[in-house]
Amino acid sequence: GNSVTQMEGPVTLSEEAFLTINCTYTATGYPSLFWYVQYPGEGLQLLLKATKADDKGSNKGFEATYRKETTSFHLEKGSVQVSDSAVYFCALSDRGSQGNLIFGKGTKLSVKP
Amino acid sequence: GAVVSQHPSRVICKSGTSVKIECRSLDFQATTMFWYRQFPKQSLMLMATSNEGSKATYEQGVEKDKFLINHASLTLSTLTVTSAHPEDSSFYICGTNGETSTDTQYFGPGTRLTVL
C-alpha cells in the first residue's frame, strides 16, 4: 500500500541554519504530495504542496520538489528562524480513498536563537 | 484556503461518559470530512471518513459503535466518543477537502480529549 517515510527527529538547529527534512514515499499512480506544519498546541496547517513530477511547492521560505525518479519530496529552507520550531509532516493523497491523506510520522524541529 | 473549526478545543471527562466533538466548515460545503487521531509524538491516523447523508466509513481496527460519526449537513460533522476510557485520551482532528481542490485537506485546530 501507499506509505510515507520521514527522517526521524528531533532536529535541533541554530537560527539562520539550513534545514533539510527528508521524505520518501511509496505509491501506486501519481499522488499529490504535501508538507503540513503543526505548531505547539495547534492543528495542522498546509505548508506547501506539489501535484505532479518536477513541481516545486514553496511557501514562507520553505521549498520541496516532487522527484518521481527518487520518490522523494524533501523539505528545505535556507535560513530557519525560531518561529519555525514545530512538527513537520510529509503526506500524500491516497486518491483511491476519497482524498484521504497518508502521513509520515512527523519531524520535530527546534530552532535555537 | 478553507476554514474549519472544531469544538471544544479541550475536554476532560470521567471514564464511562460520552463526549461529542463538532467539526464545522465555515466558508464552504463539505461533502466529505475525515476524522484523525493523534497520539503523543505520533503521526495522524485516519479513523473514519464521514460522508454527508450516509454512513461513515471506518478504518480497520476502529470501533464504529464506540466512535459514532454523524454528518447530517454539509457544514457539520460530529464525532462522539461513547463510554470513554483513559486509553481514548488523544488529540482528535477533523479535516476536509476545500471546494476547489479534491486533494488538499484543511484541518480543524483539533480537540484534546483527556479521560480520567
Image (cartoon, grey):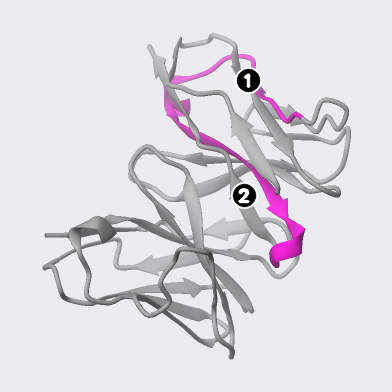
Residue A33 visible in the shown view: yes
| Frontmost residue, B72 versus A25 | A25
Q: Position of residue B14 (x, y in %)?
A: 11, 68
Vertically, is A101 above or below B97?
above
- Say left or right for B93 vs B91: right
| Frontmost residue, A33 versus A27 | A27
Q: Which mark is residue A102?
A: 2
Vertically, is B23 above or below B46?
below
Q: Quadrant of residue B12?
A: bottom left
Q: Position of residue A6 (x, y in %)?
A: 59, 29
Q: Residues within 10 Å of mark 2 (few under 14, many from 20)?
A: many
| Frontmost residue, B11 versus A31 | A31
Q: Residue at x 82, y 48 (%)?
A: A28
**What kind of residue is marked 2?**
Ile
Residue at numbered disc 1:
A77
Vertically, is B5 above or below B51?
above
Q: Position of residue B103 (x, y in %)?
A: 72, 58
Which badge, 1 or 2, is on the more N-terminal residue?
A: 1
Q: Residue at x 46, y 11 (%)?
A: A15
Q: Nearer the viewer, mark 1 or mark 2?
A: 2
Q: Which mark is residue B57?
A: none
Work out how far the residue at label 1 is from the one at label 2, CA to CA, in angstroms: 23 Å
